[in-house]
Image: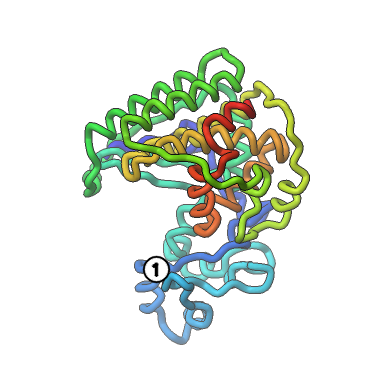
Amino acid sequence: MKIVKPTYYKDFKCIAGECPDSCCQGWEVDADKESLEFYKSLDSSLEIKQRIDRVLSKDEFDNTIFTLAPKKRCPFLNDENLCDMHIAIGGEHTPFTCRTFPRFIHDFGGTREIGISFSCPVAADMMYNLEGHLRFEEEVTDELPSLNDIDAETYIMLKNARQKAFDILETDKHITERLRELLELGVSVQQKLGAYEEGGDDIAFRDVFINPELINPEWREKVSNMQIKDIENTSANENITAYFIYKYFLDAVFDGDLLSKVKMAVIGVLINTYFGSDAWTVHLWSKETEHSQYNMDRYKRLLKEADCLSVNSLKEKL
């Protein structure tokens, strides 16, 4: 298995209880099957076993989750903002989401791409302020390729197209011109993948970001105070674009929807421009949207259906 990581990946370190916006607060956490099996094996006399059993429940999708404490805090998050489950039974036995956050892992047969998300404020600060262009490190492990039904020809085509996207992003042109070229690339590649119908929903641009599931009230304030401004030609805006291109572009091999993923990269720059030009703003959006199934499903729909997010509308904003 070939493992691909951004060069900054190795520098990320969780600051645990010092975090300004704990990942253990604001959203529900699924208890994965492997973790559940381990919890069942614990001695019933252990306090942590009893606490786990008390808070396990089901959501509307029949997923096993931990019932949140007041203020949407994880029931194992103590007063020092540290995890009592981690302390009691080790971090390797916390749920998969907790063990991996804010990392994302995408398998493409013999290649695994790994990164970190803007949803973590430490990761957001690191990526937002990255100096130089996005670069990657590769290593080969003994792990066997993952089973998949990926179409090899489509994957290679998308991989080549993503390299073109990175090449566009690394030119000396103003970021707005680079974003226009990325949209044009997205349209061209999408035509090879299949039809893409957009528009039909006249929702206002601001309202796109008023999510039904509110995780942090500060994000709602950011949206309410939206200011239309010119896009600055900064390294931060390039870094935001590169993040989306790396994280989502190749996923089109699974769903055939490449253009929405390119739009996300452009909209990421608009979020940074209209709602607050700093890493914290992008972090809030990411935590609010990328890590809420409700909000992300709605956003994916609006990427296609919202008139204000059509290719032509986005070009007009650049």
Residue assigned mark 1: 35
What residue is rendered at 59% in x and 24% in y? 131
**Mark 1 is on which residue type?**
Ser
- Image coords of residue 233 (percent x, y): 65, 21
Judge from the rendering whether residue 94 lies leftward or rightward of residue 22; answer left or right.
left
> Quadrant of the rendered structure where residue 246 is?
top left
Q: Residues within 10 Å of mark 1 (few under 14, many from 20)?
A: some
- Image coords of residue 171 (percent x, y): 52, 15
Nearer to us in this view, 290 or 43: 290
- Image coords of residue 15 (percent x, y): 61, 50
Judge from the rendering whether residue 275 lies leftward or rightward of residue 129; answer left or right.
right
What residue is rendered at 48% in x and 77% in y? 56
Q: Please state, as top left, top right, bottom left or bottom right, where the C terminus lies in the image.
A: top right
- Image coords of residue 153 (percent x, y): 23, 32
> Quadrant of the rendered structure where residue 313 is?
top right
What residue is rendered at 64% in x and 67% in y? 72
What residue is rendered at 56% in x and 38% in y? 309
> Quadrant of the rendered structure where residue 204 is?
top right
Q: Does residue 188 lie above or below 125 as drawn?
A: above
Q: Does residue 131 lie above or below 91 as drawn?
A: above
Judging from the image, what secondary structure is the residue with disc 1 in?
Answer: helix
Nearer to us in this view, 128 or 35: 128
Q: Please state, as top left, top right, bottom left or bottom right, where the N terminus lies in the image.
A: top left
Q: Does residue 260 lie above or below 84 as drawn?
A: above
